[in-house]
Amino acid sequence: MTWHVAGFLGHDCASSHIVAGSEHRPGCTLGETDHIERSARRERIVKHDRVMKTRQRLARRVERAALPERPFIGRGPRYLVQPSVAAACASSLRAIAAVLRDETHSIDEASLKAVERFLTRGGSPFLGRDSTAALRDVVRLKDVIVGVELAVFDEERLAVAV
C-alpha cells in the first residue's frame, strides 16, 4: 500500500510511523524515518509561517484602522470610518495589533476571523456613526484576543482616612 505525505511517496511502515510517534519502526530504514520526521517538521514550519503572515497582515490592517482617515472630497461618503469612531477604538485596536504580532500568544482561527469581520463587515458598528457601540464591540473583541486579566483581591481590611 502506498501513501503520499508532503511530496514523499512511501509505504505502510512509514505511515504507521507518523501515527505511532518518533520511535523507529521495524521494517523502516533509518533514512525513511529521518525523511518523514524532517518532512513533518517542514510542514509545521510552513503552516506556522503562513499563520504568522496572516496575523502580520491583519495587524497592519488593525493599526491602519486605528488612525483617523482623511475625508474624501467628491461623490459618496466622506469617511468610511468616522474619525470619532476611530479615535474611540484606537487604544483597543493597537492592543489587538500588538497581540497579533506577538508569536508567543496563541490565537485561534475564529478570533482572527472575528477581528477581520469587525473591520470589514458592513453591519459592524466600527463602520457606523455610533462610537459607543463601536467601543463596546472592540473592547469585547480585545478581551477575547488579548485575554482578560481578572483582579485578585486579598481579604485584608483597609483603613480609609477621611
Image (cartoon, rainbow, N blue to C red):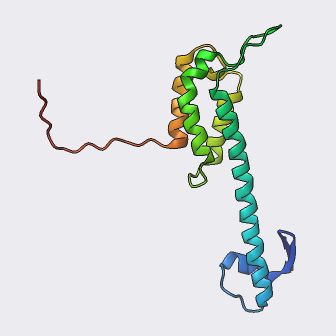
Q: Is residue 27 left or right of residue 145?
A: right
Task: Give residue 74's position: percent from left, percent from top.
Answer: 82, 8
Residue 121 lies in what quarter of the image?
top right
Observer able to see residue 20: yes
**113 versus 27 height, above or below:** above
Residue 45 position (above or below residue 112): below
Work out whether residue 145 or residue 25 is closer to the camera in this orientation and state it: 145
Q: Position of residue 43 (x, y in %)?
A: 76, 65
Left or right of 44 in this view: 142: left
141 vs 12: above or below: above
Q: Residue at x 62, y 28 (%)?
A: 66
In the picture provided, is 127 more to the left or to the right than 152? right
Q: Which is nearer the eye, 74 or 149?
A: 74
Tell me how many marks there are.
0
Decide which of 26, 145 is in the foreground and name it: 145
- Which residue is painted at 64% across and 36% down in the image? 114
Q: Tell me the quadrant of the picture where the C terminus can be found.
A: top left
Q: Quadrant of the N terminus?
A: bottom right
The x, y position of residue 47, in whole percent, is: 73, 58
Q: Is residue 2 at least partly visible in the picture?
A: no
Q: Pinpoint residue 128: horizontal percent, then vertical percent.
A: 64, 16
User: Which residue is located at x 54 percent, y 32 percent?
Assistant: 92
Quarter of the rendering containing residue 88: top right
Identify the residue shown where x is 76% and y is 68%.
Answer: 42
